[in-house]
Image (cartoon, rainbow, N blue to C red):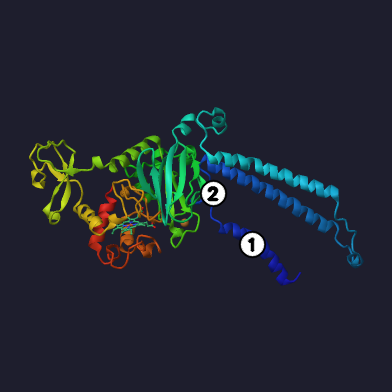
Amino acid sequence: MGHIHKLFLRLILVLPVLLAFGCSRIDHKQSALDPKGLVSQNQFDVFMLSVWITIFLFCAVGGCLLYVLWRYRAKNAEEAMEIPPQSHGNSKIEVSLIIASSIILVILAIPTLQGVVLMNKVPDPNDQETLDKLSLDRSQVEDAITVNVTGKRFFWVFEYPQYGIVTANELVFPASKAVRINLRTEDVIHSFWLPKLAGKMDLMPGQENFLWFIADKDKILDGKTVAEAMPSVFDGKMRETVFAKQKFTDEFEPVGGLFYGQCAEFCGNSHAYMSFRALAQTDKDFDMWVKKFQDSQNPNLQPKAYDPEMEYSKGSEVTFNDQSLGENAQRVFLASKNVLPGQAPNLSLKVWKKAHSDDYEIGKQLFSSLQCVQCHAVNRTGIGAKGPNLTLFGLRTSLAAGWMRNDPESLSDWLKNSNDVKFGNLMWNGEGVDDSHPLRNLEDDDLKVNQLVAYLLEQI
Ligand SMILES: [Cu+2]
């Protein structure tokens, strides 16, 4: 064999090894090969069944071919000139091959159809037989939570109809309960892909699609404590832990309860950056998160204007003028003791203190005066809004649809020029936004940007 031939042969042998190394590890953060829930495990099992069948067929057909090549090779030049007897059309062989292929198709079809049925609806809590088969408790499906997901270019709206709350880009859910996901889009086709938990489903204009998932708590914990693997979202522990353990470019989850999702159907310029996150919580922490959101989005619970006739108990919040922030400016005051009628908010009184930093209060004014409120709802339920709901934004781990880390640096970059950060996004390029819009004029205004950052990240 010539030199070149040998080299070629070696390359061919090395190629699969190189390719295998090129692939990421199986437990990469967006890997369908590392299921952490019942539905994704089922899809994985069907996939592996077809992989093994394919490997078997590959070996069987390849083996026959190699055997025949060797067994019937020409032993000398004379034999090589002869045409061997031709025997195609052997009906016994053909019929048995058809039967064998049909059997393989049936073997594949049964678990596939079972998987489709499973995916299609959360098991009925009264169907004990199915629950036993899936090793689920009645309560896990009975108390299933529902999330209405709306895909928008280029972010996600998560509405929880049972609780009357709305958030964006980070789906908080209880690890031990089934989660029903209703999928809609307000513009083009998107696709909801949450590989480790739920698989993938398209969002179609004018149609509602569905999928559900339930996480496997033991796999999330993986021998760690709840505090390590599923830190609570409502008090900022999740954000703290994720930031401590993760660079933004890390390819693996820093904590087991953090899952990565992605829009998987091309939807425009920023499609590649249309990610999201799903955060698993214990039942208790999930309830605390829901409560906090309900309170934040309840207009009756927002601080009201100070009333001189009223007595205020310690911890009450009121709004009142504060000239130090600007003419006619208001701030939120917090009663540090019980306050008698007539003791109007005044910092020198010592019964009132600032509820938030000055930067927060000024940032809040800017949020209105710079027209951010055109598109963003904060502390209010609003799914029709053009931009993501920013309620309790300071608890979020990620920014701009899971694409950046939600810390002061990235947030300032975003506010200065979001188009540089996420090209084509519909904040910078939204309807009615041109170079005269205030949001396009923050690039050199560090002061305002810092005040907006303070306002947004102090939403906790
Ligand atoms: Cu997309």
Whether residue 168 can be seen here: yes
Assign a secondary structure to mark 1.
helix
State the image coordinates of residue 154 (x, y, percent, origin top left).
42, 57
Quarter of the rendering containing residue 448 = bottom left
Q: Please name the residue that numbered disc 1 is placed on.
A: 15
Q: Residues within 10 Å of mark 2 (few under 14, many from 20)?
A: many
Within 10 angstroms of label 1, few (less than 14), some, or many (20 or more) residues?
Answer: few
Write the residue at 38% across / 56% down: 400
Instruction: Using the image, tell me which numbered label, if any, was put on residue 448.
Output: none
Residue at the image position 40 percent from the left and 52 percent from the top:
246
Give 182 or 65, whichever is nearer the viewer.
182
Marks 2 and 1 close (CB-CB < 8 Å): no
Closest to the camera, between mark 2 and mark 1, is 2
From this viewpoint, is residue 254 visible? Answer: no
Disc nearer the start of the sequence (2/1): 1
Left of 289 or right of it: where is 217? right
Relative to 175, does residue 27 appear above or below in the rendering? below
Quadrant position of residue 129: top right
At label 1, the amino acid type is Leu
Foreground residue, 236 or 399?
399
Q: Is mark 1 within 8 Å of ligand 1?
A: no
From the top left corner, tell me how far across and down residue 335 is, in percent.
15, 40
Q: Which residue is mark 2?
A: 32
Q: CA distance from mark 2 to mark 1?
A: 24 Å
Kind of residue sitting beneath label 2 = Ala
Q: Position of residue 104 (x, y in %)?
A: 71, 45
Residue 436 on image: x %, y %: 28, 67
301 sits left or right of 72 in the view? left
Identity of the residue drawn at 10% across and 46% down: 346
**315 or 119: which is nearer to us?**
119
- Helix, strand or loop for disc 2: loop
